[in-house]
Structures are given as C-alpha cells and as structure tokens.
Image (tube, grey):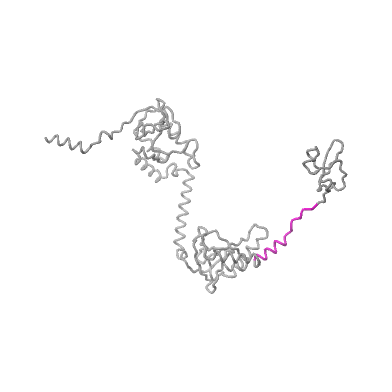
Amino acid sequence: MTHWKKVVVLILFAFPILGANALNWETVRVNHVLDNKHFSIANGDIVEILGIDPPDLFFPTKSDRPLARKTFRLLKLLLENKEIKILEDQIFRSKNGIFPRHVKLDDGKYLSELLVENGFSRFSSDGENIKFDKKYKTAETRAKKDYRGIWGDTDEQKSLRQIRAKSSIAARKFRKKYAPFFAQIAVGRVEKVLSGDKIQLGNGLKIRLLGIQAPKKDESAVGLECFGAEAKTFLETEILGKTVWLQKDVSDLAERDTLLRYVFLPEEKISINEKMISNGFARSHWITKDKKFREKFEDLQLEIFENPRGAWLSCVEKILALPQKKEKKSYDVDQNCPVKGNISGTKKTFHTAESGWYERLQPEQCFETETAAIAAGFEKVK
C-alpha cells in the first residue's frame, strides 16, 4: 500500500462518523409566538422549543408570575416575522402533532441557551432530545450563580436572600459566641428574670425553661394577668442572682437567640421547671421532641388541676370575683296559647312570652309557633 493510501485509511478510521454528526439546520420563517414554549412557522406547523421549562403564560405560579409576560414579550421580539434555524433531534414529530426542535436565532445564538442563561426559563430535558442538554444545563448553572430572573432577580427575592443571609450569619455568630452552652450540661449565673418561664444569664444568653409555660404580665385572658406577675415574682425569688446549671434534652433553641433548657439549682434534685408547676406558677407545656421529664410534668399538672394552688388558686379567686353575666330570664308560657295573635283594625300582630303584653293580652287567635303566626299574616311585636 502506497504512503498516500495509508494516510487516507488512517483518516477514515479516525473519523468514521464525521458525516453522520453534521448538523442539518433548517431555515424557517416564524409567523406567531403562541406561548412561552411554542410558535408557528410559515407552513402552519407548530414548533416546540426544546431544552426549556419557562413560566406558564396562562397559569403561572406565584413565583413565576412576574416573568411570565416578560418571557412572552421577549420571544415575540426575537422570533415573530424573523427567519431562524431549527434542528431536529431524535423525535421528528410528537404524538400531538407538534415538532420538537432546537432553535438558533439569526445571529447564531441558541434560543434555549439564551433564555435559560438569563433566567427567563429553567432547563428541562425530555430524556430523548438531548443533543444540547449539556449546553443548556451549563447555562442554568450560570443563571443560578448570578441569581438571574426566576432564580432571584426580583427586588422581593433579593430582599429575602439578604434576610436569609443575615439570619444565617447571625445564627453562626450566636453559636460561636455561646458554644459552651450548647453542651449537654452548662453552668451560668442568672442576672435577670424576664418572665415566669424565661431568664437571662450574666453573659447575655437567654434561657427558656423547657416543658413549662407561664402567661406574661399583659396576658389578655380575663383574670389571668395575675398569673404572669406572680409566676415571675416566684421565679425571681428562687433563682435571681444565683448560679444554676442547665441541662439539655433534645432541642437546642426555643427561638433564634434563646436556648431551651431544664434549669437546676446546685443544691436541689428537682428542676426549677418542675418546681414552677408543683407550686402552681406554670403549666406543663410541650411542643418539641423533648421527653426526659414530659411524663412527670404531665402527671404533676393533673394533680395541680385537681388541687389548685399558687397562682392557679389566686387567679381562680380573681375570676370568681369578676362580675358574672346575667342569667337569661325564664318566662311563663301559656301552653294553650304559646303565641298570642292580636288584631287591631287591619293590623295583625303577635306576642311571645318575652313580650311585656303577653300575660295580660286576650288573644284573638292562638298559634303553636312564631312561624305559624307569620304564615297567617301576623307580625311580631318588637
């Protein structure tokens, strides 16, 4: 075999499918953009744009709504009455008669890549027409990185991102500042009692007593404002200015800046939490996964309900001292004439037992019910 023939053979073996990989783009003219994913061309065919999942024009989600119309207007500007190129992938025509195609604009840009990269659409693949999936997916990565369009390019979304970022930074700073207190056991000195179930340590850390609840001073429930005041006073008497140790259960935080803990005085075996319930200054209250003392607190609470003491008792007395609602007056009803009808000229009226005239009225007509009286053309006396 001569030298030049060997070269030709090597080239053919090295690039066996060069011709098969050639892209046969078809030039078409766009008539109308139908929605954010379909358009019609001059011969009447409808083309579906491959590689995108744009905001629905007619039924957008709440988050997609701001961009739905913008995407539609952009497509009209880019496509309508323009000559573009379309490319068939694996499927020539879908079952519903639509032609799925990749689209290239007159300036050579891929339409789907342009939309996805600028956040007008998400990337989407049907798993079959995948010729440019990698290109479109890379475009989506760039859009997400820069928070474009549907990935956060609105003022509201920017504001939410900033709030989340600040909150995340604050949470990390909080954990770093009070790291020793996230351990199973920690020790601190009580500087301030904020309410009947919340305290503040000397280092500024706030602690909510786990498993209990005490109303605040301004509790709106009638008669319970004393509960909050007395609970706080009792807690101050017990632990204000004293060194306590804190025990963790399952939960860490009650709020973003408040730990949830059982609180103990060093010389006592039962927690202050339990003591608040047993003395009638708090109730058992659980909304977390914590369970170390749950059963004990619940049983204790049942006992307090049966034998009120402490704040429970004083608040009950206060409620009992409040003006009571007037009981509804009972009226004597004439069983032979429950509803008395009266006729005065052309005017027909009826009286029930609540009426001041009922007892002394001699009725012209009697009725079993008000409905029967009304049906007979009588009007109730107001």
Q: Residue furthest top?
A: 43
- The magenta segment: 311-330
Does 202 sit above or below residue 92?
Answer: below
Q: Quadrant of residue 134?
A: top left
Give percent across and percent down for residue 140: 39, 42
Q: Quadrant of residue 96?
A: top left
Please tell me which residue lies in front, 371 or 270.
371
Give percent across and percent down for residue 223: 68, 60
Q: Quadrant of residue 362?
A: top right
Q: Say whether residue 242 is left or right of residue 36.
A: right
Give percent across and percent down for residue 40: 42, 28
Looking at the image, which residue is at 74% across and 58% down? 324
Q: Say whether residue 33 is left or right of residue 291.
A: left
Give percent across and percent down for residue 339: 82, 44
**Placement of the N terminus among the 4 image quadrants:** top left
Looking at the image, which residue is at 44% across and 38% down? 54
Q: Say whether residue 232 is left or right of residue 105.
A: right
Please tell me which residue lies in front, 48 or 33.
48
Does 306 sit above or below residue 331?
Answer: below
Looking at the image, which residue is at 53% across and 59% down? 288
Does 179 sit above or below residue 326?
Answer: below
Q: Residue furthest front?
A: 336
**Placement of the C terminus among the 4 image quadrants:** top right
Please tell me which residue lies in front, 345 or 29.
345
Q: Say whether residue 204 is left or right of residue 215.
A: left
Q: Is residue 329 magenta?
A: yes
